[in-house]
Amino acid sequence: MTPHARHNLLALLMLTAPLAACAQQADAPPAPVAAAAPAVAQSAAPQLVTGLPDFTQLVEQVGPGVVNVEATVGSRRTAQAEEEADIPEIFRRMLPPGFQIPGGPGQQGPQRRGTSMGSGFIISADGYVLTNHHVVDGADEVKVTLPDRRELTAKVVGSDQQYDVALLKVEAKGLPTVRIGNSATLKPGQWVVAIGSPLGLDHSVTAGIVSAVGRSASAEQRYVPFIQTDVAINQGNSGGPLLNTRGEVVGINSQIFSVSGGYMGISFAIPIDLAMGAVDQLKATGRVSRGQLGVQVGAVTSDAVKGFGLPDNRGALVNDVVSGSPAAKAGIGPGDVIRSVNGRAINDSSDLPPIIGAMAPGSKVTLNLLRDGRARDVSVTLSELDEGESVARSAPAAPDAPAAPAGRNVLGIQTQALDANSRKQLGLESGDGVLVSRVENAAAREAGLSPGMVILQVGRNKVNSPAALDRELAAAKPGDTVMLLVRNRGVTRFLAVTVEKG
């Protein structure tokens, strides 16, 4: 047999062997069959995202209502302000008060007119235009350029720094307008579009999603619950519209977070609901008035939950109350936790200022708060916020006299009584507070307590002498969290100190 024939024979035997085996098994008695494992029922996950949107129709419809805003700053502003006008708006907001710009007053350098470039959008056919306050702030002349290249002189009807909103008026009729949407319905993940003039490039379109809502982006604008997006925004986009996929304006692009001055993926817009509420007041009076409660609040930390025996960390912890304010008249005090306003939940301390500020002075509101672990409702009539009012007070100089011998307390704090002059500087009532002269306890130091601070309360209980402080601390046991209300350099807040074991 040739090698080739032998190879073919082996291949044939290999193919027929399994068939023979199968035939033999078929003739044999059937073997028991193991039960098959039940199939795991698994339905397909629903399709959550179905393709990318096409914004061309949106831009065609909304674009005609978006304008370029140019504000010229002249001789009525100081040289310092002129120099600031040339600085990108995000940097300008970050400069501390009194910062000397190179080439500014008293320094060598040009003192020239400046121009602020921004965007805006038309909200009525008879010529009302909405933009940012910081775009037109202090301007001698404001011009609005329409998409058809018409250039119109605009009058600043009114402007508000806190909301960063300005209302302009141009003399024209039959202008294309934008549609106003509802910013309260925005949710993270929704598509949004911006149209504006970044870096002078008119009618640029960028898109992204809502990253978060209700952001507190700036201490100076604590009354604005910003919309955070990842829409590309740059210098010149300020005042332009933020749009939903229906082409409705849901916000006014206002700020970016940046370390370079350019877009870095985080942009902030003013909710249109807030802005349109300001428009009515600007038309009527040229200014915006806000309600005032008269409290300074802070976050409810995990330590505060333990120290005050709270059910959770939701709400706004009252740190200070302005004397004679609506809150003071209603009996609200440091240590209270505000949980809701007229039934609207306060989840974080930053939620409170925008809600109160959006209400008209004279409004009656019901606050639900926790005090000593119990919920209660308090009725308050709001006053008008004075923009120049500050709760902060100067800290007194440390007394020259040596500290009196301190009693022993579990926190190792040595204190001394305040004299009348020190209390006056702090705005304290007679007998309130004790001055910290020494902190021996490591836990107290780590919590931030230091000599020179004034302790006003232990929990919700006021202290007016070293002996009173020691009595309040006597019941604290190792492992307990003690809440101390302290005032330091004009700021009043609670410090949480854990009593050391052993």
Image (cartoon, grey):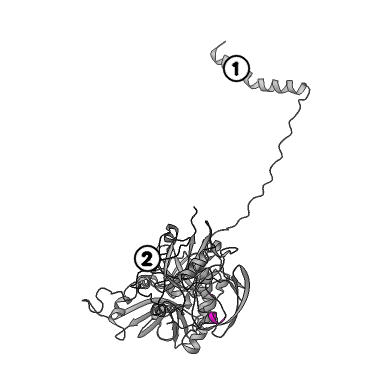
Residue 311 on image: x %, y %: 60, 63
Outermost residue, right side: 29
Farthest residue toward the left?
108
Q: Name the residue under label 1.
A: 10
- Left or right, 413 with respect to 190, comes to left
Report the front residue among 449 and 238.
Answer: 449
Q: Quadrant of the N terminus?
A: top right
Residue 55 spot, x, y in % from top left: 51, 67
The disc label shown at residue 401, or none = none
For this rendering, which residue is in front, 158 or 70? Answer: 158
Q: In this view, does 202 lie above or below 362?
A: above
Name the residue tied to disc 2: 262
Mark 1 or 2, nearer chain start: 1
Dot 1: element: helix
Q: Which residue is drawn at 56% across and 86% down?
A: 362
Q: Does the magenta stretch include residue 419?
A: no
Query: Eyeballing the image, is 331 above or below 94?
Result: below
Position of residue 74 measured from the top left corner of the image (x, y, whole percent) = 31, 84
Residue 69 visible here: no
- Residue 180 location, x and y as percent? 54, 77
| Highlighted magenta segment, given as a residue range | 325-333
**How many other residues sit within 10 Å of disc 2, few (<14), some (14-19) or many (≥20)?**
some
Seen from the viewer's position, the closer of residues 171 and 313 is 313
Q: What amino acid does circle 2 point to? A: Gly
Of helix, strand and loop, which one carries label 2? loop
